[in-house]
Image: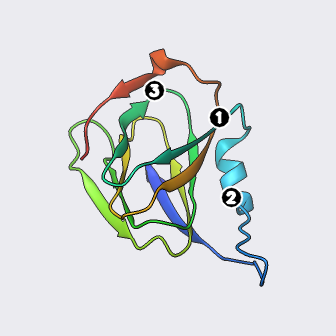
Amino acid sequence: MANMKLQISELPNSGDARGFSFTAPPEALDFLERIADLHMASTAPGAVRGNHYHLRRREAIVMLPGSAWSLHWDDGAGSPAQHRSFDGSGAVLILISPGSSHAVRNDGTAVLWFAAFSSEKFDPSETVERKVV
């Protein structure tokens, strides 16, 4: 990932008539080094999840197909907030390094689902609020 704090990849759909099927690329597993925590959640239309960064934990978030949404992030304290919009038609992998504040906003009209895999066990003391949206 070089010096990038956050990397975004659209995952190819290898599904068939039964439905979607997505596989995380090997570099996502290499980025995490290990999976110590898994968190799955939904986000209601108009709601935001995140607006925080992690002190130690690397995170891989898989946004599932569904509602339109936007990702908001920074590259660390004092850096400008950035954003990118998605139409919700496919799955998106987001790799997040420690120090990069991040948030997801559901910009659509349906519930948005995601799964977040972390390199460390959940510890609320290493999650720090910093708004990017």
Residue located at (32% from left, 61% from top):
107
- CA separation in Å, label 1 and label 3: 12 Å
Please state the horizontal and vertical placement of residue 39, each as a whole percent of the image: 62, 37
Tell me the amino acid under the disc marked 1: Ser
Of the image marks 3 and 2, the number of the one nearer the N terminus: 2
Between residue 18 and residue 132, name the one nearer to us: 18
Q: Residue furthest bottom?
A: 17
Residue 77 falls in which quadrant of the image? top left
Q: Is residue 68 visible?
A: yes
Please state the horizontal and vertical placement of residue 21, each as a whole percent of the image: 74, 70
Image disc number at residue 119: 1
Q: Secondary structure at mark 1?
A: loop
Q: Residues within 10 Å of mark 3 (few under 14, many from 20)?
A: some
Q: Is residue 61 visible?
A: no
Of the image marks 1 and 3, the number of the one nearer the N terminus: 3
Residue located at (31% from left, 47% from top):
74
Against 97, residue 82 (above or below) is below
Please state the horizontal and vertical placement of residue 130, each as a whole percent of the image: 28, 33
- CA separation in Å, label 3 and label 2: 22 Å
Against 78, residue 22 (above or below) is below
Tell me the amino acid under the disc marked 2: Glu
Q: Residues within 10 Å of mark 1 (few under 14, many from 20)?
A: some
Of the image marks 2 and 1, the number of the one nearer the N terminus: 2
Residue 1 horizontal side relative to residue 133, left or right: right
Q: Secondary structure at mark 2?
A: helix
- CA separation in Å, label 2 and label 1: 14 Å
Image disc number at residue 27: 2
Between residue 3 and residue 76, name the one nearer to us: 76
Against 38, residue 125 (above or below) is above
Q: Residue furthest top?
A: 125
Tell me the amino acid under the disc marked 3: Leu
Between residue 102 and residue 17, name the one nearer to us: 17
